Amino acid sequence: MKALPSIAFNDFSGSAKDVTARSTSGGTILSIRSYPSKVYSPNQKIQRNNLSKISRAYKQLTDSQMKSWEVLAKHLKATSYLGSSAEMTAHNAFVRIWKKRARVTPCTGCV
């Protein structure tokens, strides 16, 4: 939400509690910090629970299984930003693949 300030705020910039003022070429603009509603849909709760189960399942893998995921991760490509793609970690590869599987079937143990 934006509002133009009164004359008392000429060339003012900074924050006070939830209000931030910034100077632009058109004058000073006041903006109020927004807060999330913390209302989650049932589907969001399911997805969050699946993600946390998958992440916990990775921590329970043996060392040899983690090494295998590291090898696989070297062959997978992460999302490309600004023309270059980042290397994927073993944990990211595990979560990416199991998250796709969880969409098809619910994660019950994951491994």
Image (cartoon, grey):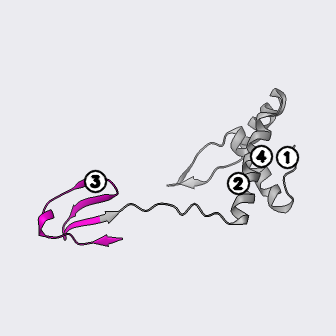
Circle 2: is it few (<14), some (14-19), or many (20+) Cα within 10 Å?
Answer: few
Dot placed on the residue nearer the N-terminal end, 2 or 4? 2
For residue 67: magenta? no
Q: Nearer the viewer, residue 99 or 70?
A: 99
Q: CA distance from mark 2 to mark 4?
A: 10 Å
Q: Residues within 10 Å of mark 3 (few under 14, many from 20)?
A: few
* 4 or 1: tag closer to the N-terminus: 4
Q: Which residues are magenta?
A: 1-30
Q: Position of residue 5 (x, y in %)?
A: 20, 69
Q: Earlier in the sequence, mark 3 or mark 1?
A: 3
* Residue 54 badge: 4
Picture disc at residue 110? 1
Instruction: Give the residue at mark 2.
Output: 48
User: Can residue 60 be seen here?
Assistant: yes
Q: Is residue 94 visible?
A: no
Q: Position of residue 25 (x, y in %)?
A: 18, 67
